[in-house]
Amino acid sequence: MRLSTLRNACRNVPIPSVHQPRTGVKVFGLAKRSLRLGHSSNSQLLFRAASSISGPTSAEAALTFGKQPKKTDGPGYENTIRENVRRTKEEMVALQRGHPALKPMLAIIQADEDDSLLEINKKMAGKIGLNMTQICLPRECTEDEIIEEVLKLNEDPKVHGVYLHLPPVSLTSRVLNTLKPEKDVDGVSDLNVGRLVRGDMSQGFTPPLANAVMELLARHDTPMAGRTVLVVGGEGPLGVALQCLMQRRGMVVLNSQRSSEGLQKLVMQVDAVILLGAAHTDVPPTWLRPGAAVIHCGSALMTEDQGVEMSSLSGVGPLTAAFRMQNVVRSSSRWAQEQQYRPWTLRSLKLQPLSPVPSDIEISRAQAPKPVDQLAQEIGLLKEETEAYGRTKAKVRLSLLDRLREQPDGKYVLVAGITPTPLGEGKSTVVIGLVQALSAHLKLNSFACLRQPSQGPTFGVKGGAAGGGYAQVIPMEEFNLHLTGDIHAITAANNLVAAAIDARILHEATQTDKALYSRLVPSVNGVRRFSPIQIARLRRLGISEIDPSALTPQEVTSFVRLDLDPAKVTWQRVVDTNDRFLRKITVGQASTEKGHVRETQFDIAVASEIMAILALTDGLRDMKTRLGRMVVGSSRSGQPVTAEDLGVSGALAVLMKDAIKPTLMQTLEGSPVFVHAGPFANIAHGNSSVLADKLALKLVGEEGFVVTEAGFGADIGMEKFFNIKCRASGLRPNVVVLVATVRALKMHGGGPNVSAGSPLPREYIDENMSLVAEGCSSNLRKQIQIAHLFGVPVVVALNVFKTDTQAEIDLVCQMAKESGASDAVPCHHWARGGRGSVELAQAVKQASSQPSHFQFLYSQETPIVEKIRMIAQKVYGADDIELSPEAQAKIDYYNQQGYEKLPICMAKTHLSLSHLPEKKGTPTGFTLPIRDIRASIGAGFIYPLVGTMSTMPGLPTRPCFYDIDLDPVTEEITGLF
């Protein structure tokens, strides 16, 4: 809203009748002379009255702001200032009682070197206990230079108020409205003036100068109501503010320009004249009615020949400063209040499910998502805590954890599944349907936390991972394609390590120690010095010297030689595409590599250890440490070589600094979702990030719910969630939701094989109670028992398909309860959205109120072999394990290196509880073979290989990309699912 519009909203149109002049005029601090009023850089407030009779006397002051003023001497006015300071100090004490570390600060931007205003404000700030800083710009500074400083102060969390002490010509609309309204303690931005006009000052500020003028008017003899006031030159924010304040106190307000021909006539009608702006104006005493007041809101003091006694004017500037400090304290209080937990104001999006259910992308496109900044506000995020990526997704900054560190966590729910068919059983849709039911239908704060999908499966066989039907994350195209670039950041970081490995091997093989040293520690401008990461390597080598010229030849050799064995490099390159021909490659064949050829391979990007680190880290410092300790291979002497030894860990942290922030999106019904990390569920732990869960648990509040998903079946994803993720995060789950389907239970009950892309056999379409019963008594019962090993209550969610019969559904729910589930309910979220999972939401709410007796399966102190054996026997049902000689040698090596306390991340097939994919149900009587053991030291786990694990999927004969296309006119994507 423009100031002209605001002024019209406040303008009192009728002009009152002329009052008759009075006699017996008093003089307040002035000689009997005309008053020349102007502007200078001080912006000090002057209060002046005129008389035709006597010489100067002391000024009047109101003892109490807002009450009928008393007529007093100058000391009474000082009392007014002291009273204002006292109240502000009380506010300050109350503020710091709750926030001891908070120190409010005022920043002043001025365009000259006049420090008089600074001294007034500095003195007042000192009385109240505020900090103050001053930015001095050249008198001829440009608009862009001012805005640059304003933007810096906007983003400075230590600054709570900004005062623009600039010439009027510099206070352009662009400058004023660049300043954040919450820091605009002089109330000059359009938004703050608009708030004043509306009478909504809960978030705005009254200009200090306007407050001071009102205080001076209140000190006059007559009541404020009914008084007529002339405002001269009131075109800016101050004029609008004054007009509104005076009209609210019942005053009649007239407006005039300084050059107006009728100015004298208007002055003679009014009880007070307020002069705004920079131009000079003469107001002869003969123009003023007896007892009338003149308030000049400029700062030029009268010249000596005008006979004004300066001492009588010295108290008004501090009053303005006092009101300004009061606004700074109130700004700080509001800031502190904003840091507290905010109740949600979530607006759910309405669904109108169709039958038959359209394709996933049609459903997604039919729903208009809320702007992400609106969603963020609804769930209590501050503006500075989000970084928007387009309209529908945003990164959330980790500073939220500091702000809400005292906020109790909500309820923590894990969605796992029984051993799946190759088609998947819909865990992601259950997560989304459950969250939609909790938030949109039970009106409970709830958050979904999901993994980011790899583009390999999206263009391969499986398709996307945004859920399905009426339980989706939207927009599903953005969810499945690129998102905010986290996987690309991981790819870049991973391949930087790979490049550093091969380059270091080449350079060490082709250079002397002296040549290596001179290149690793070059002379820059005649000075040689180690970088911080090189100093850290010296410390690990036991070398305390930091002067490059002081190292002994032996120390130089130790420093420059990693001596990586090409045959023992364990680090692979990655790409986020299913490309089977990269499973084994040869590098170094160009002549420039001087014959340093070696075999290596590509993994898919989500198999990178950096992805696992992203999923398990709890902050930037921890991530940087984890990245540095990643082991990339061994030296010829058998010592581990790390990313920090390569000198690359700092660069990796730079590449990952944005990827560490979870991405905020929403479901079809407007419920919030964090999408973050997507580690493999076989060679890694297959869960979304610790950070996403922690942020969500703070945001939902103590009575809210965070629902996250574990990859594959409960024997893999859930076990790793408990033993790895919960151990790293310190979080403890309240409930496990175990997803089952009738078709998967039939498979475990003895049904024929199921394969992706082939029609389902008749057994899976027709009712077959015996297959369902056998599947429940075998695999479903076993998975419930696995959850109970960890002391967590289980709710079974039967994901209903249209081929399921009511008898089959009832049988599954009955047998699940008999097997120890707290409850078992059918779910129809795919066809109905959140409404189809209300019964599940109620069951989860009830189960979460039960006591949880969470426990780990093993302690950190348990030897590596015994950890593996406990998982094999208690979780998989094996009789024992069998270690290959290679695996046993690796265990001995890891024990020697001090890795024996790391948790175990079993890498085995997800299609069976055993190591044999064809063994369904609950296999028994088998020995689990451990072919090899590897370690992800940065991520913090050891992963035994059970059988052969492929870390690079291949494309089928007919990949999904055959159906994916783009309309060049509408830019709409088709074919994703």
Image (spheres, rainbow, N blue to C red):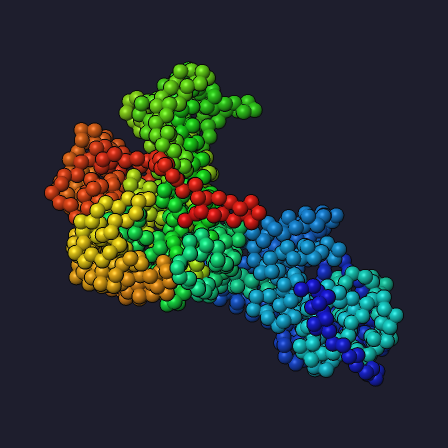
Tell me residue 565's x, y (percent).
Answer: 32, 22
Residue at 59 percent of width and 67 percent of height: 85
Give the residue furthest to the right. Answer: 261
Q: Is residue 158 above or below residue 288?
A: above
In the visual, does 877 lie left or right of 798?
left
- Quarter location, residue 871: top left
Tell me residue 139's x, y (percent).
Answer: 74, 49
Specify the quadrant that holds the N terminus: bottom right
- Quarter location, residue 198: bottom right
Q: Is residue 585 above or below residue 484?
A: above
Q: Is residue 480 above or below residue 795?
A: above
Residue at 32 percent of width and 35 percent of height: 951
The total number of labels drawn is 0
* Res. 853 visible in picture: no
* Res. 352 visible in picture: yes
Tell me residue 276's x, y (percent).
Answer: 76, 65
Residue at 46 percent of width and 17 percent of height: 592
In the visual, does 282 lie left or right of 693?
right
